[in-house]
Amino acid sequence: MASVKFGVGQSVTRKEDDPLIRGKGHYTDDYASGPVLHALVLRSPHAHANFTIDTSAASKLPGVAAILTAEDTADLGVLPCLFNLPDEPFTAPPYPILSRDTVRHVGDAIAFVVAETMDQARDAVEAIVVQWKPLPAVIGLNNAVKKDAPQVWPDHPGNVLFDTSIGDKAKTEAAFKDAHAVAEISIVNPRVVTNYMEPRAVVCEYDVKREHFTLTIGSQGSHRLRDILCENVLKIPKDKMRVICPDVGGGFGTRLFPYREYALVAVAARKLRRTVKWTAERSDHFLGDAQGRDNVTTARMALAADGKFLGMDVDLMGDMGGYLSTFGPYIPHGGAGMLPGLYDIQAFYCRIRAVFTNTVPVDAYRGAGRPEAAYVVERLVDAAARKLGMTPDAIRRKNFIAPKALPYTTATGKVYDSGDFAAHLKRAMDIVEWKEFPKRLKAAKKQGLLRGIGLGSYVEVCGTMGEDETAQVRLDPNGDVTILIGTQSSGQGHQTAYAQIVAEQFGLSPERVHILQGDTDVVATGLGTGGSSSIPSGGVSVQRATRKLGVNLKEIAADALETSAADLEIRDGFVQIAGTDRSMSFADIAKRSSDPSKLMASEAFNSADGTYPNGTHVVEVEIDPATGRIRIVNYVIVDDFGVTLNPLLLEGQVHGGTVQGIGQALMEQAVYDLNGQLMTGTFMDYALPRAADGPSITFETHNVPCKTNPLGVKGAGEAGAIGSCPAVVNAIIDGLWREYKIDHIDMPATAERVWMTIAEHQRRHRL
């Protein structure tokens, strides 16, 4: 059957790749319906300052159509923060579309220049006169919470947005009193810059007669952007705006948010009655787009003599930057719920603080709090093993939640429904030939190299977007099928994945299944893409809508074939009487139906319970002690994603996320000086992993179907970025511990940092 060839579980090649690799992709910056005006943002060179602005001279320059300042956007709402604490609500400080008289990070927007050409806009930006009065700035979490630190917001003393906790403090304190030993770590999860391949861009057309905006934006979800821009910022009815999303060159969470420029082009287009385009330069991305991670954490584990975990105590601070991005405060708070990891930890407590600094705002970045949590617990588990003289695999097996204990409710209220954690650990260790590591260690020593091996066993939560994701599946006149859905692909392969779900039911080849997404006038509703939710939620909706449409098609065919619908089956795009050669093609059914509503079906699904992908990464590294250079020589991943929809797409997702994690572990970091200047604001200073930095990865699945998801899937888009950081850093520390008894290094473990760590250790031991 064709469904076997193209259906669920098959390695169907991505149907969307051909136009992209041939240069026929259509991105936002490619779009222009006619002559357009070009826009640039004037950004603050100071991390914290008061200012006055004079645009009079710049406004008179040739080609300048408009210069917007805070005065021109005074009637707009602020960018909203969509998260708050349920029991201890905080008051979010205003995040204005343009700053009026005070800036709070380098890159803060103070003016929006619109001109006939980009060069004319640039001339006008340089001609704007700004009088600056610099104010004290605070950079870094530990500095921000000091007693006399400069204040980012006067209404938030101590620079703390909230200071809350989860878990049972008394129970956890009791566990530590009974402990045989305590393992403790203090670690930094460094700030990173997303650096998707395609910088953000937006084009706005304004229809004067209809008082209607059409925005073309490469994003992770058109409906969410439209709703926030209309309801919170522009204060207009939602039917006054259409948002279209063309091809998107990467998202990683950071492209989900309603940035300032989207409202600014709308204001400018309405004022000028012209189409306005803004396209970010890479420097705009570094200074204007939400950044990721940036946690400082101290964690302790109470241990029994046999290695059993008795309790876990965590103190977590998350950097918010100078403003609250859309989901910024949720990231440390939501991520903290995953801190117990895969382990049976009965007593748990975590203090969580969200802290302001004079830096670019921080928000979701591939994994959104779950990578930070996995990094903490997996570093801590290795520290516990060293504390007790156990091997890292033995202490994990000792404390893993057993399959017979599932479903298991963690101390933070997460319910793990399925999995076999010891099994994927064992399989990964077998593939990497763990028992043979001493031989490889000995061979490396002969070459003057250190060798380390590390584990990262992770779990994350996916698919919880909070609302229904609706899919409409319709039969086209030519017998093809079109899916309308509000998820948004930014490189994941939705066109192929959804087509396979249809193929499983109808037997159509992927070329005959078409996906419409990213247009609020065409697709009625949509949650966008985030939290690895597209297949766990959208995939279920597509499956159910396809089945529902199949019932309709059988009813139409039954009437034409003069038989019962119960005697019909759907194969290869035909409805046929089982066991006979009598059939009707989909195209004939489309022509025969007198009721258009019978040729389409809609279904919705909300993955409210979430899904819990999990797995083990094993990494082996060689370290040159003379230079600090690290080389990954072996990388194995065994994951549990419940059910594999497309092995080829899945492996690509895992590889991509893993290399992002390797980048963070070994080289990526957004570095600010004490004045708030971003020292790594270009690719000359901010290192990204190249092809040569990505090792050959051996990848397998050890799937246990999810019991709370109708497809059995668990989500996979972020998993690679979650297991990789702890596995890589644990491998590095393993190598340093074996040779020098060095038990700590922070990310990124650059060659310089490794060399300096070794040199400092040797210096101390010479004294």
Image: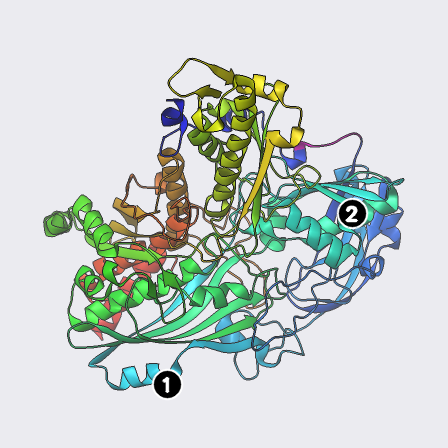
State the image quarter where residue 245 is shown.
top right
Tell me the tag on residue 123. Answer: none
Q: Residue furthest top?
A: 581
Q: Disc 1 marks which residue?
A: 170
Task: Out of 327 and 287, give the one closest to the viewer.
Answer: 327
- Amino acid type of disc 2? Ala
Q: Is residue 136 magenta?
A: no
Residue 142 place in picture, x, y as percent: 48, 74
- Mark 1 burial class by Cα count in 10 Å: few <14, some 14-19, many 20+: few
Front residue (pair 608, 638): 608
What is the basis of the colouring in this image? Answer: rainbow
Front in this rendered view, residue 637 or 701: 701
In percent of width and height, residue 282 lies at: 60, 45
Residue, x 39% and y 82% (percent of image)? 169
Residue 125 in view, yes or no:
no
**Mark 2 / mark 1, whichever is N-terminal:** 1
Give the side of residue 546 with respect to residue 177, left or right: right
What secondary structure is the stretch in magenta mostly built from? Answer: loop
Instruction: Look at the image and tell me in which quarter the N terminus lies.
Output: top left
- Residue 456 appears left or right of 447: right
Q: Secondary structure at mark 1?
A: helix
Q: Residue at x 59, y 69 (%)?
A: 84
Label disc, if present, on residue 266 of the rendered structure: 2
Helix, strand or loop at label 2? It is helix
Position of 353 relative to 37 (above/below): below
Which quadrant is the C terminus positioned in? bottom left
Which segment did they paint magenta?
30-34
Would residue 556 appear left or right of 434 to someone viewing this image? right
